[in-house]
Amino acid sequence: MIDKATLRQKKQTDKVDYIFVFTLFVFLTGAGLFGFFSTLMFLIVGGFYVVLNFKYALAAYKNNWFIFMFGLVGVLSVFWAEYPLAALRTAIQYLLTVGIFIVIIYCVHIDVLFKAISMAMLAVMVFNNFSSQTVEIAFTGEIVKVGYFGSKNNMAMVASFAFLSGLGAFFCDRSSLLSRFLAVVCIVLALATFLQSRSLGSTISLVFVLIFSCCLFFYSQTRLLNFTKLNINLIVTFFLVFFVFFVVVLFDYSVYESFMYSLGKDPTITGRTDIWAIGFESIAAHPILGVGQSSYWNLNNIGALDIWELAHKEEGAPFGFHNQYIHTYVELGLFGFLAVSLVFIKLFIATNRLILKEMRAIDIVVMSFFLVIFLKSFFETVGFAPFSLSTFFLCLSWVHMRRASFYDKPASIKLRLN
């Protein structure tokens, strides 16, 4: 528990924390939209916050060290990567990004965190409404608005994050009518942006995640014994795993293809299945260590050239496998795959613990962030990229679902120099 003196001292920094989080989030969003300057400012402001809270930063890293494993595997891949400097650069960027995220999430009270994030996301949604930029989907010929986000999937994902952030701020702040009003505005604008993306998969996943998270919340509030809940959870998990295994074993592509055509959808999921097939060829050739982080996408790689042509992209353009697990396995092999998979497994274990302890209302939002990223991970490369909103929200879920923030496990580590 936090003693009153420490809590009072932390409360005095709430306004400063709010300014830091808001500023960081503006630069973080800008890193994906405007590039180098926003990225540099994010590192400067974030690094300054880490220095100011150094004793808490050390405790945050100690309590949440596993989230860094992906970056450490990336650093090690320097020794076998075809392009070691690219591997080292990406790994260090990831470690710096997560290092800043974890300290912010660990130190800042969740109420302050969500209020600042929702205001930053509100600004982003307003800013994006001034853009009328559209793109044509090469596989379908469909014209969709993408705003400043480059793709409809990216716009849908950012809008869903903004929606959940506004919802979190609404749950957290019950004292200020102005803050709750702005949270509602953020929710409305985020929904408008989300619907403009016309992403059926994102819409279905967001609705499913919200319903599922609310069901888990009400289930956690039931007066069942923990032993009974644990048994129910184990049985449900077993049947889900069995169902997935059953579907995979009996999967018939011709039936799936006919079903997708009946819905008017591309059975390759906008070329993803073809891209994954090329990825599996690379995995078969480098099953243990992969090719090294950021070393696959180069002009000397036939697989990368085929994917750029298949996706109608310019050769050398930044790209991925549209699947976090395949993308990671191609680059970092079995060890990278395990680093990613174990993060999600640990978060599902944390979900089980939350249900047994009784969830808070804000846990609906925190869990929803995790579930959105998890569902997206099968169709996008999300959650483990430097300077990425999805990486921030995965870290947010990691800390708060595991009850590993300062307000859950107050700790600070001071270094003594002799």
Image (tube, grey):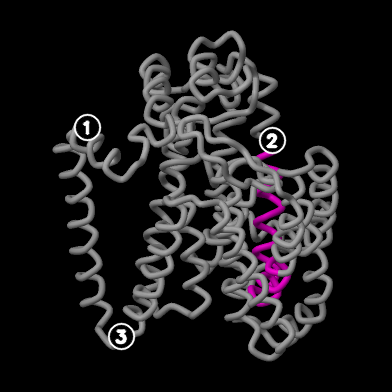
Q: Position of residue 219 (x, y in %)?
A: 32, 78
* Mark nearer the N terminus (1 vs 3): 3
Residue at horizontal 31%, vertical 45%? 263
Q: Position of residue 34 (x, y in %)?
A: 79, 42
- Distance between mark 1 and mark 2 Cα atoms: 41 Å
Residue 36, above or below 219: above
- What residue is shown with label 3? 222
Q: Secondary structure at mark 2?
A: helix
Residue 93, above or below 209: above
Q: Identify which residue, 307 or 83, lies in the foreground.
A: 307
Q: Which residues are magenta?
A: 93-118
**Residues packed near mark 1 inside 10 Å, few (<14), some (14 to 19) or many (20 plus):** few
Residue 83 left/right relative to 237: right
- The three-letter amino acid code for the residue at tag 1 is Tyr
* Mark nearer the N terminus (2 vs 3): 2
Quarter of the N terminus within the rendering? bottom right
- What residue is shown with label 1? 253
Residue 106 forms part of the magenta stretch: yes
Residue at horizontal 55%, vertical 54%? 394
**Residues packed near mark 2 inside 10 Å, few (<14), some (14 to 19) or many (20 plus):** some
Is residue 294 visible from the viewing direction of this image? yes
**Residues packed near mark 3 inside 10 Å, few (<14), some (14 to 19) or many (20 plus):** few
Q: Position of residue 322 (x, y in %)?
A: 48, 35
- Distance between mark 2 and mark 3 Cα atoms: 45 Å
Q: Identify which residue, 325 or 253, lies in the foreground.
A: 253
Q: Identify which residue, 112 or 159, lies in the foreground.
A: 159
Residue at horizontal 62%, vertical 47%? 145
- What residue is shown with label 2? 92
In the rendering, which numbered label is found on residue 316?
none
- CB of mark 1 within 8 Å of CB of mark 2? no
